[in-house]
Amino acid sequence: QVRLVQSGGGSVQAGGSLTLSCAASGLVFTMVNWTWYRQAPGKQRELVATISSSGTTDYPDAVKGRFTISRHYPQNRVTLQMNSLKVEDTANYYCQTRWKQRDFWGQGTQVTVSS
């Protein structure tokens, strides 16, 4: 049974940093791609970072240079380091992966950035 359990997040002032973590079990960690998404109230879900099974990372322009996605093996953990946070980064953040043709999601973690 695949489980993704998130931790981290919270409240921070603009310019601060937070790290989100996603602990995975029930799959072969190194064989899947990982993605972090976020969704703010009233807005569509948006992708904020991906890391492929080969370790290639990609970010949208909105977070490039500020966010870093990393895999940690054998801890089977994916992290999202968020620096220079902005008010517009406020959202609920989710980790996601696809295993055996099914999508799996973490439970979500709230990040609130105040001015």
Image: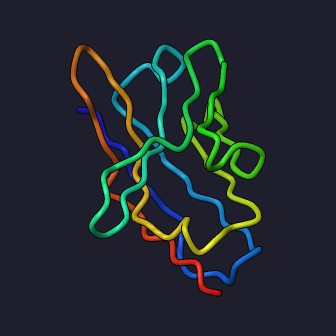
Q: Nearer the viewer, residue 72 or 33?
A: 33
Q: Quadrant of residue 74?
A: top right
Question: Horizontal and vertical percent for residue 48?
Answer: 53, 44
Question: Horizontal and vertical percent for residue 65?
Answer: 78, 45
Q: Nearer the viewer, residue 100 or 37?
A: 37
What is the quadrant of the C terminus in the image? bottom right
Q: Is residue 43 left or right of residue 17?
A: left
Question: Horizontal and vertical percent for residue 14?
Answer: 70, 78
Q: Is residue 9 left or right of residue 39?
A: right
Q: Nearer the viewer, residue 110 or 76?
A: 110
Residue at x-position 57% and y-position 82%: 11
Position of 51 relative to 82 (above/below): above
Q: Is residue 98 left or right of residue 13?
A: left
Residue at x-position 60% and y-position 85%: 114
Residue at x-position 43% and y-position 57%: 93
Position of 53 relative to 36 (above/below): above
